[in-house]
Image (cartoon, helix red, strand yellow):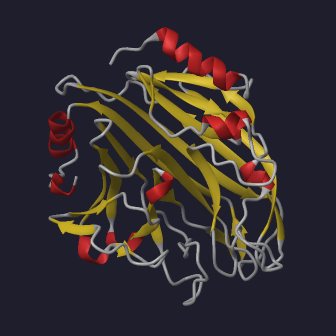
Amino acid sequence: MLKDAAEEDVLLDRLLAYDAELTKLDGGDGCVLVCPGLQGRIFCLIGDELIHRLDIAALESPSPTEFNNLGGNSLWPAPEGGPFAFNYPPDGGPWRVQKAIGEDAATLVYRDDTTAVMEKRIDLTNRKGVQIEILYRRAVSVPTPEPPLQEFDLAGLTYRTEDSFEPLGSYATNEVLLAPWSLEQFPGAEGVLAFCKVRRPETAVNEDFYGRPEGRIAFGQGHFTFALGGQDRHQIGVRVASAPEYIGALDANRSMLMLRRTEPQRGVYFNIADNDQADGPYSAADCYSMFNGGALGFFELETVGAMQVAGEYVAASTLVSETILLKGRMEELLRYLAERESLRLNIDAL
């Protein structure tokens, strides 16, 4: 689990060829790669192993017409669908990713030993045809000191993001909904068990995305699980009203544990789903989401912020998220969950 400097340098050299501003923050048993030139994405390594999904083919030979989904941890504007959608054009065209999110580079505006900050001014148009200008900002940091793991036979890394959208004009809430949405993407599907620690699991799950993931949701004491895999794509949300503590995933194939947490915020949570939102934009209020890519071979653990308002206008919103990444034997990962995170998982679904 120790770093192999040669292996790490090969990856860094490869990424630096496409992002001269790439910044490495060392922490724990690995590092965080902050990538302004890759649309503000974040990637992590434990030792010499890349933990996030990175689509090398799309990086080296990007499509001139399709969205190049490189992976990593990326920041998106919510909502994706519905009448205020950022992923559907006003003319009724198909799903798309706007250039400001899918192509435009950010700029590194601050860097020290533990923190890197990226910014870019972006222009977006929502489904209503309203054009807005926003300051996109990501502050990425590693804790000092790193949370100790001495009592566990695990390698690990923790990092934190403060993701914000600041409107650079006056936009009324009857024309624009806007909140930051962090999508953290990992390779795999079969053999991955996603989960959420939540006080009221039976009422926590929002299945109104792509249809009900039949047979994949199970409820336990103070948590629910979501068995990933299969050919179909599925997405679920976790209702902020259910007081969730964190979401995560246990990957039996890579012997890895990923955890994400964000504190519920004051503000307006709305429906982020990629569908028509037949019951309206306020028909759901989720602070987490999980995406099962199925045949695509990747999954996402997502944190969702609340829209802030000033009177009848959209105000600056910030989403604070923490990610913990751990690698080691399955029994140690399960012991960590039980002893550090007060969650005992039944892994029969793996």
| Nearer the observer, 283 or 12 | 12
Q: Nearer the viewer, residue 261 or 268?
A: 261
Q: In this view, does 182 lie above or below 268?
A: above
x and y, in percent, of residue 149 in the image? 25, 26
Residue 288 falls left or right of residue 216: right
Work out whether 314 lies above or below 334.
Answer: below
**Residue 198 position by quadrant:** bottom left
Q: Left or right: where does residue 305 sit relative to residue 79?
A: left
From where the camera sits, is residue 264 visible? yes
From the image, which quarter does the N terminus lie in?
Answer: top left
Image quadrant where residue 73 sits: top right
What residue do we see at 59% from left, 82% from top? 281
| Left or right, 271 with reference to 131 | left
Inspect this view and state whether residue 141 appears.
no
Q: Which residue lies furthest to the top in this view?
A: 6
67 vs 259, nearest the viewer: 67
Q: Using the image, determine if residue 250 lies above or below residue 147.
A: below
Query: Where's residue 125, x and y in %?
Result: 81, 68
| Above or below: residue 308 compared with residue 182 | below
Q: For the image shown, how many numbered marks are present on the structure?
A: 0
Residue positioned 64% across, 56% down in the render: 76
Residue under the point 73% across and 52% down: 101
Q: Residue at x 57, y 44 (%)?
A: 71
Q: Where is residue 38 in the image (x, y as percent from the top left)?
A: 70, 37
